[in-house]
C-alpha cells in the first residue's frame, strides 16, 4: 500500500493492514486520520443483530461484549500504526495487543449501534506503541482504555 491512503478506508483495504477476518474484523471503515501534529484515527464498527456473539450474550437482551469493544479499539490502533509506519516509509509488520490499562465501560452497546472508535498515539518507543482509545455511540462515550501494542516486523 502507498503512504497516502484515500479516505474513507474501506473494509477491503483494512484487510490489507490487519490480519483479522470475519468474525473478528471489528473495524468496518476508517473515517479520518492525522499524523501531524499528533497521530489520531477515527473509525467505525457497525453493530448488527447478525454478530455471532449476540445469541449467547445475552439471549433476549443482546449486548456487545466489552472485551470486543476494547478489541475494536485495539484494531483501530493497529490501523493507525500501519498508516503511520507507511507514511514514514517503514516496514508495517503486525501489531499485537500487549496490555490494556484503565478500561472503563459506561454504557452497553446493542444491535443497531454504530461504534465510533477514536484512538490517539501517545508515544512510540522502539516497536511499542501506547494509545488512548474511546468508543462512542451517538456522541456518548461507551468505553475507554489505554492500549499498548508491540510491533513485529514482516518476515
Image (spheres, helix red, strand yellow):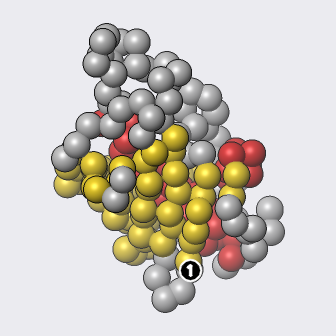
Whole-percent x, y for residue 105 in the image: 21, 45
Dot 1 lies on which element? loop
Q: Give the residue number, with chain letter if any, for mark 1.
A: 35
Classify 10 Å Cα crowding around label 1: few (below 14), some (14-19), many (20 and above). Answer: some
Residue at 42% of width from left, 69% of height from top?
A: 120
- Please give left or right for residue 99 compared with residue 73 in the image: left
Q: Does residue 61 sit above or below 31 in this rendering?
A: above
| Nearer-the-camera pick, 100 or 33 | 33
Does residue 101 appear anywhere in the picture? yes
Residue at 39% of width from left, 75% of height from top?
A: 123
- Please give left or right for residue 85 compared with residue 104 in the image: right
Does residue 98 appear anywhere in the picture? no
Whole-percent x, y for residue 19 in the image: 64, 41
| Nearer-the-camera pick, 139 or 100 | 139
Whole-percent x, y for residue 75 in the image: 50, 49
When asked about the image quadrant of residue 9, the answer is: bottom right
- Give the quarter of the figure containing the N terminus: bottom right
Residue at 57% of width from left, 27% of height from top?
A: 23
Residue at 42% of width from left, 63% of height from top?
A: 119
Q: Does residue 10 sit above or below 84 in this rendering?
A: above
When asked about the image quadrant of residue 54, the answer is: top left
Amino acid at each position: 500500500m502507498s503512504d497516502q491512503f484515500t479516505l474513507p478506508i474501506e473494509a477491503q483495504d483494512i484487510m490489507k493492514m490487519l490480519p483479522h477476518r470475519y468474525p473478528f474484523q471489528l473495524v468496518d471503515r476508517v473515517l479520518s486520520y492525522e499524523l501531524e501534529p499528533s497521530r489520531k484515527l477515527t473509525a467505525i464498527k457497525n453493530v448488527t443483530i447478525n454478530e455471532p456473539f449476540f445469541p449467547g450474550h445475552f439471549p433476549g437482551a443482546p449486548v456487545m461484549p466489552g472485551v470486543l469493544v476494547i478489541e475494536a479499539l485495539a484494531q483501530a490502533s493497529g490501523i493507525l500504526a500501519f498508516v503511520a509506519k507507511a507514511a514514514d516509509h517503514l516496514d508495517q509488520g503486525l501489531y499485537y495487543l500487549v496490555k490494556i490499562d484503565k478500561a472503563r465501560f459506561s454504557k452497553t452497546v446493542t444491535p443497531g449501534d454504530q461504534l465510533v472508535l477514536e484512538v490517539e498515539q501517545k508515544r512510540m518507543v522502539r516497536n511499542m506503541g501506547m494509545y488512548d482509545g474511546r468508543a462512542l455511540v451517538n456522541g456518548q462515550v461507551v468505553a475507554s482504555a489505554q492500549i499498548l501494542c508491540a510491533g513485529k516486523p514482516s518476515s
